[in-house]
Amino acid sequence: MDTHYAGTPAQVRALGAFIKLLRAADRVTRATGGVIAAAGLTDSRFGVLEALYHLGPLTPGELGRKILKSAGNLTLVIDNLERDGLVGRRHATDRRRRPVALTPRGRELVRRLLPDHVRGITEAFRPLTAAEQDTLAALCRKLGRALEGPPEPPPSPRLRRVPSGRTTA
Amino acid sequence: MDTHYAGTPAQVRALGAFIKLLRAADRVTRATGGVIAAAGLTDSRFGVLEALYHLGPLTPGELGRKILKSAGNLTLVIDNLERDGLVGRRHATDRRRRPVALTPRGRELVRRLLPDHVRGITEAFRPLTAAEQDTLAALCRKLGRALEGPPEPPPSPRLRRVPSGRTTA
DNA sequence: CGCGACTCCTTTGATATCAAAATAATTGAC
DNA sequence: GTCAATTATTTTGATATCAAAGGAGTCGCG
């Protein structure tokens, strides 16, 4: 849908780019979702499995930061993956942080799906030349990086607490 | 997250573009969602309101095709908007197709939110130059169009039905 | 050693999302 | 006029999503 908004040229341009960006993302997601859906997975589940496949066991907090899901959502997604025997929660020294790891079955599923999934993505991007794909990636990266917000500071030694109220806003 | 996939150069390139496209779309959605959320709306609700604002009353089927939501989802989203007094379902000659229209209150809400929403989008895209925004839009459009699938054929005269079974797959 | 501050994850409540099935309405052949 | 085929929307069931609240666990000050 073209924009119907009557604004400044900068606004019309940004709105047009915004709509087309979201549409393209939606289209490629739908175009490439078949392999995942055929395996009985959802995008979110596959995202969790894929992250664990590439990076090894991760705590829910680490997973949430990697794949940009809220803690509450991840609890449910991990619960369902565990129920299906694709991941397992491990115990660790710090019992607040429970790493999630792939089971052998989960690892095998990702190993089997990834090549087809990647082939599907490559096929979906075929309408763009290699140079166009590089340009698209560079622009998306520039935009995404700028909107990332400042990186979280590394964990610092605890501040001494003061008697009156919290130290944070 | 950079790709960790060891594939052909074309695959690595497409995968990189894919990830960055989805990340950028996610980032701009989150960056621009504040105005909508502050008004107590979700992205989907606002999408419905915005489509009705620009295009006038639409049936759920037409809305679904415009904003790419399933019929079942739209029923719920429209139900909630109707409950909140922002849209109304109308009766039509063909009682299967019930157009949805903005109420005066819904129209006023969109009229009030749109300028701020568009300003937010323009601000979010500021990290890209005007030329870069145009290039991004053109590439996304090219990609999105290619993945659209053939447009639905216009409604055609009914085929004569044959006695044995259905004519469609 | 006790306890408050803080971290991490789970639970809760509401909403969104889809596919599939069900229901309601229309259309046209016989 | 009847009825099968078709169209459009709703309902159902399962899952995903978030924000906020709650529970479990850790840490360091006094």
Image (cartoon, coloured by chain):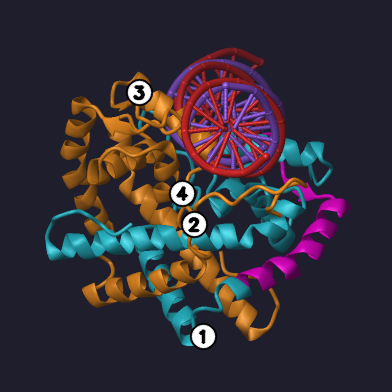
Chain colours: A orange, B cyan, C purple, D red
Look at label 2 and name its amino acid: Asp
Disc 4: CA contacts within 10 A as few (<14), some (14-19) or many (>=20): few
Instruction: Judge by depth and name the residue closer to the eye, A163 or B158.
Output: A163
Residue under label 3, please give it. Answer: A82
Q: Are marks 1 and 3 in contact (CB under 8 Å)?
A: no
- Image quarter where the C terminus of chain A lies is bottom right
Residue under label 2, please give it. Answer: B26
Look at the picture and state if C4 lies above or below B166. Answer: below
Look at label 1 and name its amino acid: Ala
Q: Give the magenta part as a residue range.
A: B93-121
Instruction: Judge by depth and name the residue closer to the eye, B55 or B68.
Output: B68
Residue A160, position in %: x, y? 61, 50
Q: Are marks 4 and 3 in contact (CB under 8 Å)?
A: no
Which chain does the numbered disc 1 sit on?
B
Residue B10, position in %: x, y? 17, 64
- Relative to A24, D12 lies left or right: right
Residue under label 1, please give it. Answer: B130
Q: Residue at x 57, y 46 (%)?
A: B64
Q: Is residue B133 magenta?
A: no
Which of label 2 and label 4 is nearer to you?
Answer: 4
Which chain does the numbered disc 4 sit on?
A
Q: Is residue A24 visible?
A: no
Residue A78, position in %: x, y? 40, 30
